[in-house]
């Protein structure tokens, strides 16, 4: 390679030519492919997407990639404004964090990287000398790039602390736990191509049109072409309306999923729609499961509990049983539950007894929320090849901080002050009990307000990193834009802290590519490299990619061999368990939280895009028409919602989309702290909180 | 009471002030850089029940716009000179409608699309504007206003169709929906921007003309020069 070509590769910002970069949208688990066109003079490629002019005078346009098999040129309302989320000193993103800051006399004051890093390293050293490694904890995102996650993981390892958790705990942990329990591995088994082959598609507890828009576009197109669409949800979403047209919509009572899927299994077994050959060859535990569902889950016995007539349960089960193949997909409705792992296992049971697992067009998978840093779903025991960290969850860390045994917490790319349940307690602990909070982020937010040291991070486009999407596909993000001020990639913070604490030999890397080469050893993607992804785009590589000659694995379990001791998947005989906080006379409503199309998670990026603000200018609480009449609530009125943990005031929207006795609001709307209300009840296996159900009361103001 | 109202009103008043001096020649509604220059007041979207919600708040929005118009008198004058979007007896509503205030229209060739009696009778007139390959439609809303939009969805360019009952334009490809009664604001689906609004004019004989458009229609890209003009304008603000 010529010298000039190498320098262009190393520092693409130094060239003046128009360049095309491979990147991807990071704002959901689909990870649509984009080509970024950047240069001092460019020809706009897309008809309607925004072009921004960066500080260095270059124009940037992000064009949905027609060659990418994930989106084939499609894009969502989040992907449309990718370029507007880049740093623009004249635009709404001008408040990006640009310099490290240290809290002095109660105020965050600008400092240099060296001073801030020395300060953090010295404080951590003194905490570890006093109280051992357990006095320090790390909590970071798993969607901000595998390289960044790996550096933090290495820091936790060398410090010897068990206080290490990822924010996937709040998201995909139940899905991973359920998959591991039934199939032996937590990886998502499906491929996005399966949609094109499916005869019936089940969306269970997934508002896919809002959260995974491009996958939903494919499902909708396929349903129009004749596939049956079955939607199971508490709320009548856009997907549910389409299901009424192209299939069946089951509006169930909150948290009754286990009963529903057991009843469906009952129907399938009674109607002889199960795949006996597949079960005898590849599935264990069918005898117990058969007895269990046949004796306890006749649809007539559970129809009142579920809130759906037995006939409709039968009809839906018959559609699933007769469709060869049928694709089953689940969303947060099954994972953000106090019994989420059970719910996931109960829907996997359906996929197993119908023999759909591993068949093209027939599989089960959780859709997931955000991309995984290294594998998807993320690693919960911190296990990656040669690194194993037995970890405590963020909730256990909070308990420790409350007790005083943990003094310091390093956060990166997470917003515990918005995303954790029972926020009042979290705020109390983080602001009063925690001695030393280090936050790495791209914007000032509720968590940086409490921080003792703040590091500015490089965002999308300002650093190279990789991640994986819902069908285990590698996503590659290239560097094309300068970060604001002195902001640096996230991996710099743990690397430099580790070096300053005397572990320099454990942090040998100087670029994210070197980290990638280090982390991929002994992992399912040992065959990947930055060079391969740059050359052909990342979209073709679905994990596992064991060697540099292989292009990956389209779907898992094609041969029916599961990674369990006896190579068989396991059917779980599960029982419906009531919600942790059933409605009472004082708190007669069930509060359900969810997401909105144009608002990504806690929304801190898209609140800076004017078009997005225009689409959802404020948070609102959906109230059923009947309940609203009884309580004297009308649309636009401010109401007070109260749970045992807190109270918020919010604008009501009266609708028939939610059933009687159910309230619905957005999970992480900025400035509307819904999580003050939510309960800190967690799944026993995965420790995912029950965001989807708690008892609440409503009064008109 | 409307929580974000101050924030929303802030943006357009800046835009309005900048428009007051120079009649708009570019179409900043489409390629947006930095600050919003299209919408000033907007209401929650997504899902059903939205229509009901927005209607119930419409009178409040008008009140807010009224207070805005008091502060930007110059801008109103400019708009009156450019001619109003709505016709006949509904002119009063028109002067208060957000369309007349937030959007800046790029003048295009004057095209006769039909007559007042035609739209009163059929409720809808289809035509091509600004070019012969750009489908557009004028509709009469339930409240009597007459509005016109380009019919190419801003997401992938599929032609949208009008649902008279909910007063929405819905895209058959990916179900993006636009509120016809609110400047074609996106209320559902992946569409990034509102449909381009078309400026209408009526003469004494009851003929209706299309005379301008608020943003380029799908497929007609903005050039770098236009982006530079927008940047130059924003840096002057």
Image: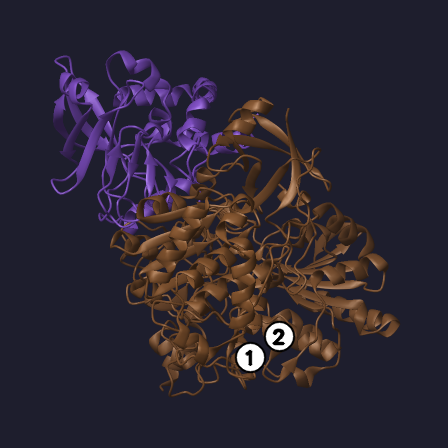
Chain colours: A brown, B purple
Residue at 59% from the left image edge and 64% from the top image edge: A173
In the visual, does B70 lie left or right of A519?
left
Estimate the x, y position of residue A244 in percent, counting from the top left. 35, 44
Return the residue at label 2. Answer: A151
Nearer to us in this view, A258 or A142? A258
- On the same chain, marks 2 and 1? The answer is yes
**Residue A290, disc:** none
Q: Is residue A676 above or below residue A124?
A: above
Quadrant in the picture for residue B143: top left
Kindly indicate whether the residue at mark 1 contacts the one at mark 2 (C-beta within 8 angstroms): yes
Q: Nearer the viewer, residue A101 or A579?
A: A579
Relative vertical location of residue B63 with respect to residue A230 in this rendering, above or below: above
Which of the 4 image quarters holds residue A682?
A: bottom right
- Number of numbered discs visible in the structure rendering: 2
Residue at the (35%, 78%) spot, across then down:
A535
Is residue A460 visible from the viewing direction of this image?
Answer: yes
Q: Residues within 10 Å of mark 2 (few under 14, many from 20)?
A: many
Give me the chain letter of mark 1: A
Locate residue A349, reporting x and y percent.
Answer: 49, 66
Q: Position of residue A683 (x, y in %)?
A: 65, 59
Residue appearing at x 45%, y 73% in the figure: A11
Q: Which quadrant holds the N terminus of chain A?
A: bottom left
Disc 1 target residue: A515
Instruction: Compare residues A504 and A699 and report the one nearer the observer.
Output: A699
Left or right placement of residue A388 versus residue B187 in this view: right
| Mark 2 element type | helix
């Amino acid at each position: 390679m010529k010298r000039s070509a190498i320098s262009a590769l190393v520092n693409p910002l130094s060239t003046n030519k128009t360049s095309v970069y491979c990147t991807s949208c990071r704002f959901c688990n689909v990870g649509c492919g984009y080509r970024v066109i950047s240069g001092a003079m460019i020809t706009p490629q897309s008809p309607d997407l925004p072009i921004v002019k960066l500080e260095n005078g270059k124009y940037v346009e992000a064009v949905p990639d027609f060659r990418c098999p994930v989106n084939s040129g499609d894009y969502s309302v989040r992907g449309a404004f990718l370029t507007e989320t880049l740093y623009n000193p004249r635009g709404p993103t001008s408040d990006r964090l640009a310099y490290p800051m240290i809290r002095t006399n109660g105020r965050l004051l600008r400092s240099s990287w060296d001073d801030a890093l020395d300060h953090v390293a010295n404080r951590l050293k003194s905490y570890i000398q006093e109280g051992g490694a357990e006095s320090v904890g790390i909590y970071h995102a798993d969607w901000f790039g595998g390289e960044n996650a790996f550096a933090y993981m290495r820091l936790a390892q060398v410090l010897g602390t068990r206080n290490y958790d990822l924010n996937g705990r709040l998201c995909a942990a139940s899905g991973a736990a359920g998959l591991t329990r039934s199939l032996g591995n937590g990886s998502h088994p499906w491929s996005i191509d399966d949609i094109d082959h499916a005869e019936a598609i089940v969306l269970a507890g997934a508002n896919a049109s809002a959260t995974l828009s491009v996958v939903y576009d494919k499902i909708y197109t396929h349903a129009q072409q004749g596939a049956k669409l079955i939607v199971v949800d508490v709320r009548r979403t856009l997907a549910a309306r389409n299901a009424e047209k192209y299939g069946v919509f089951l509006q169930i009572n909150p948290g009754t999923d286990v009963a529903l899927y057991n009843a469906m299994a009952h129907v399938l077994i009674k109607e002889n729609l199960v795949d006996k050959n597949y079960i005898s060859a590849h599935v264990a535990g069918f005898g117990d499961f058969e007895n269990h569902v046949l004796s306890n889950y006749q649809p007539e016995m559970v129809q009142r509990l579920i809130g759906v007539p037995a006939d409709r349960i039968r009809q839906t089960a018959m559609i699933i049983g007769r469709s060869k193949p049928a694709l089953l997909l689940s969303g947060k409705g099954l994972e953000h539950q106090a019994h989420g792992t059970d719910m996931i296992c109960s829907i996997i049971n359906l996929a197993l007894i119908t023999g759909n697992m591993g068949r093209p067009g027939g599989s089960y998978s959780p859709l997931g929320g955000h991309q995984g840093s290294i594998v998807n779903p993320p690693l919960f025991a911190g296990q990656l090849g040669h690194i194993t960290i037995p970890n405590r969850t963020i909730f256990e860390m909070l308990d420790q901080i409350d007790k005083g045994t943990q003094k310091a917490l390093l956060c990166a790319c997470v917003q515990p002050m918005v995303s954790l349940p029972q926020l009042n307690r979290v705020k109390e602990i983080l602001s009063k009990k925690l001695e030393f909070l280090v936050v790495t982020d791209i914007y000032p937010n509720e968590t940086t307000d409490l921080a003792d040291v703040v590091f500015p991070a490089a965002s999308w486009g300002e650093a190279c990193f990789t991640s994986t999407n819902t069908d285990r596909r590698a996503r590659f993000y290239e560097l094309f834009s300068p970060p604001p001020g002195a902001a640096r990639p996230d991996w710099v913070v743990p690397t430099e802290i580790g070096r300053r604490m005397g572990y320099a030999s454990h942090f040998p890397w100087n670029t994210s590519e070197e980290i990638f080469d280090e982390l991929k050893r002994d992992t399912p993607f040992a065959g990947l490299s930055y060079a391969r992804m740059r050359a052909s785009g990342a979209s073709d590589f679905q994990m596992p990619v064991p060697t540099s000659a292989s292009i990956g694995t389209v779907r898992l379990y094609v041969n029916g061999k599961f990674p369990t001791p006896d190579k068989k998947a396991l059917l779980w005989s599960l029982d419906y368990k009531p919600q942790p906080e059933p409605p009472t006379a004082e708190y007669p409503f069930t509060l359900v939280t969810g997401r909105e199309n144009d608002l990504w998670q806690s929304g801190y990026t898209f609140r800076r895009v004017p078009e997005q603000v225009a689409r959802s200018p404020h948070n609102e609480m959906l109230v059923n028409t009947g309940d609203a009449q009884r309580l004297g609530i009308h649309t636009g009125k401010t109401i007070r919602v109260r749970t045992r943990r807190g109270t918020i005031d919010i604008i009501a929207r009266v609708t028939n989309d939610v059933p009687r006795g159910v309230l619905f609001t957005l999970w992480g709307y900025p400035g509307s702290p819904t999580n003050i209300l939510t309960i800190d009840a967690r799944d026993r296996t995965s420790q995912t909180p029950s965001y989807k159900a708690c008892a609440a009361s409503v009064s008109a103001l | 009471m409307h929580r974000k109202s101050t924030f929303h009103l802030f943006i357009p008043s800046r835009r309005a002030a900048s428009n007051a001096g120079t009649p708009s020649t570019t179409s900043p509604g489409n390629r947006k850089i930095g600050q919003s220059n299209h919408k000033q007041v907007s209401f929650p979207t997504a899902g059903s029940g939205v229509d009901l919600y927005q209607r119930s708040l419409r009178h409040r929005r008008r009140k807010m716009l009224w207070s805005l118009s008091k502060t930007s008198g110059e801008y109103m004058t400019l708009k009156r000179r450019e001619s109003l979007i709505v016709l006949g007896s509904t002119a009063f509503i028109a002067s208060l409608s957000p369309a007349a205030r937030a959007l800046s229209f790029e003048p295009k060739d004057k095209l006769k699309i039909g007559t007042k009696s035609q739209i009163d009778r059929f409720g809808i007139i289809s035509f091509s504007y600004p070019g012969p390959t750009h489908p557009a439609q004028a509709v009469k809303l339930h409240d009597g206003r007459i509005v016109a939009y380009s019919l190419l969805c801003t997401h992938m360019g599929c032609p949208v169709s009008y649902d008279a009952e909910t007063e929405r334009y819905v895209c058959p490809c990916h179900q993006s929906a636009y509120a016809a009664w609110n400047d074609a604001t996106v209320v559902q689906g992946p569409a990034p921007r509102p449909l381009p609004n078309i400026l209408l004019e009526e003469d004494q004989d009851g003929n209706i003309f299309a005379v301008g458009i608020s943003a380029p229609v799908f497929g007609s890209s903005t050039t770098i020069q236009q982006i530079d003009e927008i940047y130059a304008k924003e840096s002057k603000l």
